[in-house]
Image (spheres, rainbow, N blue to C red):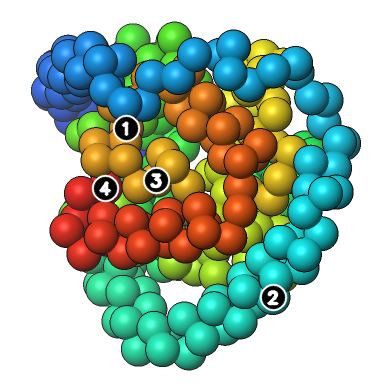
Amino acid sequence: MERTITDIGAAVERDSLVAEKSKGVFDEAMQEKNNNKVKAKKSELKWDISEFGPIVPLGTDVLKNKKAYAFFKRLFDVTLSLFALIVLMPILLLVALLIFIDDPKGSPIFVQTRVGRNGKLFRLIKFRSMVVNAEELLDDLKKRGITIKDPDDPTYKMKDDPRITRMGRFIRKTSIDELPQLINIIAGDMSIVGPRPPLPSEVEQYNDFSKQRLLVKQGLTCYWQTTRDRDYVPFDEWMKMDVRYVFNCNFWLDCKLIFKTFKIVLTANGN
């Protein structure tokens, strides 16, 4: 589906028809999110912040006593990522082709600035899941008072964002959109397992506790990524998941999270 604003008069008339639908979709998504928040708070994901100890500032080497783990983690990252790229190349090329066919106005690849270890910025690579003029449409939604964000959660994503393409919904559901980040892992910007890399605008809203999730390389998968209906996990609980990983990461935990990731992808339980 192509959404390109070419004529202001026609766009205003068309958007007025879409406004109520978009607003209704947002209201429904917010209601569902709030319902799931209650469920998530009663689940095993709720950890007491007291278990984490004092705040550790950015720049601290939390793996200084795990040098063997850090070495083999990097070796594992490069080896597995190279192998995965070679094996999955036919699938990646097919996905790129289908994205282009679905929305031929832009590249199948989307590059975005993200925040990595200790606040270092890098260019994250992923498959494009939104229309080419997504930012233009976002500005238009904002002007009409429709938001896709929860003001209490800087990472919240609207379940039925009207800017997502048909192919985009599929690759997000299966987490296939993240596979190009294997290149980021080989380049050393990311790891296979680690907290998901946030946007700079999200990090600006972090408190000192949340910033601790940036003490290790950001990853392709993590506790949150392997959680069913992960988009409905409350923001505070997500931060606790990541900080818990930072201070408890080890080889066996990484293997466990990788295994759970395969399960999420194969059962399409991602959001």
Q: Earlier in the sequence, mark 2 or mark 3?
A: 2
Q: Write down the residue under mark 3.
A: 225
Foreground tag (2 vs 3): 2
Residue 66, percent from left and from top:
77, 54
- In the rendered image, which quarter contains the N terminus? bottom left
Disc 2 to disc 3, C-alpha distance: 22 Å
Residue 228, percent from left and from top:
25, 40
Q: Amino acid at mark 2?
A: Leu
The residue shown at (32%, 32%) is 231
Q: Nearer the viewer, residue 164 or 246?
A: 246
Q: Amino acid at mark 3?
A: Gln
Q: Secondary structure at mark 2?
A: helix
Q: Amino acid at mark 4?
A: Gly
* Mark 3 Cα shell of 10 Å, populated few (<14), some (14-19), many (≥20): many
Q: Earlier in the sequence, mark 2 or mark 4?
A: 2
Q: Write down the residue under mark 4.
A: 270
Answer yes or no: do the residues labelled 1 and 2 have beta carbons within 8 Å?
Answer: no
Q: Write down the residue under mark 1.
A: 231
Disc 1 to disc 4, C-alpha distance: 8 Å
Query: From the viewer's perspective, is 66 left or right of 147?
Result: right
Q: Secondary structure at mark 3?
A: helix
Q: Earlier in the sequence, mark 1 or mark 4?
A: 1
Query: From the viewer's perspective, is 228 left or right of 8?
Result: left
The residue shown at (26%, 73%) is 98
Q: Write down the residue under mark 2.
A: 75
* 95 shown above or below 62: below
* Mark 1 Cα shell of 10 Å, populated few (<14), some (14-19), many (≥20): many
